[in-house]
Amino acid sequence: MSSSPLVGVLALQGGFAAHEKVLQRLGARSCQVRVPADLDGLDALVMPGGESTVMTLGIEREALGDPLRAFAATGKPILGTCAGMIMLDRAHLGILDVVAERNAFGRQLHSFEADFEVDGVDGGPVHAIFIRAPWVAEYGPEVTVLAEVDGHPVAIRQDNLLALSFHPELTGEDRIHRLFLGLLPS
């Protein structure tokens, strides 16, 4: 691997551009993933927020389901935020051993911001934006809860997979992306 990792960002729909900006600011190279061939040569992958139904249709249209599962099976790091968490769950791609409940905190009107500690992230509370956010309703024994809001898991880790209910890319917060990039082999 070169000194600058290549991180793909699923770019079928949703907030992929904001993730690319954070990754580039941290010194990673980024590219947009739209078709299976775009996964070739990646060191890691981000599944951004967006609308999970539209993302599901895009993954089906581009025949990305099996290639995404194969990418995950390599053990390379994957970060899923908001709808990305949903796409990784048991009911969708089946990559994470979790059940994510869509719109768990409420619809658009109930979007909110919060500050809370995330295990593995130093420097005080993380500022997070929740937009029609899911939470983890169920999780398996290999899943570690990194943060909760009102008793509901909103940040989890399973091996080299990180999933969040919130949008760190929208706040200027880069510590979550640093944690993610820290999962890459040295």
Image (cartoon, rainbow, N blue to C red):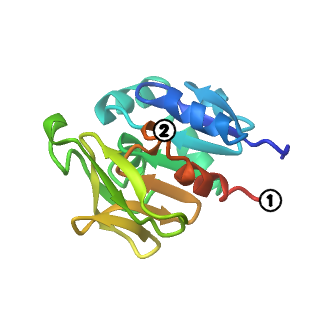
Instruction: Report the residue at 75% width, 59% height from top.
Output: 185
Counting other residues with Cα less than 10 Å from the Cα at mark 1, is it few (<14), some (14-19), or many (20 or more)?
A: few
Considering only vertical position in the picture, is 167 above or below 94? above
Instruction: Report the residue at 84% width, 45% height from top.
Output: 3
Residue 53: image quadrant is top left
Residue extending farthest to the bottom is 141
Res 186 label: 1
Position of residue 25 measured from the top left corner of the image (x, y, whole percent): 66, 36
Distance, label 2 to label 1, CA atoms, is 29 Å
What quarter of the picture does the C terminus occupy? bottom right
Q: Which one is in front, 70 or 79?
A: 79
Instruction: Report the residue at 61% width, 53% height from top.
Output: 178
Looking at the rendered image, the disc whose residue lies closer to the viewer, 2 or 1, is 1
Res 175 label: none
Q: Which one is in front, 37 or 8?
A: 8
Considering only vertical position in the picture, is 93 above or below 186? above
Q: Secondary structure at mark 2?
A: helix
Instruction: Report the residue at 44% width, 65% height from top.
Output: 118
Res 65 label: 2
Considering only vertical position in the picture, is 124 above or below 25? below
Position of residue 163 measured from the top left corner of the image (x, y, whole percent): 44, 54
Query: Disc 2 residue type?
Result: Gly
Position of residue 150 measured from the top left corner of the image (x, y, whole percent): 21, 65
Q: Are marks 2 and 1 in contact (CB under 8 Å)?
A: no
Position of residue 60 measured from the top left corner of the image (x, y, whole percent): 42, 29
Q: Which one is in front, 174 or 67?
A: 174
Q: Secondary structure at mark 1?
A: loop
Give left or right: position of 42 versus 52: right
Query: Disc 1 residue type?
Result: Ser
Counting other residues with Cα less than 10 Å from the Cα at mark 2, is it few (<14), some (14-19), or many (20 or more)?
A: some
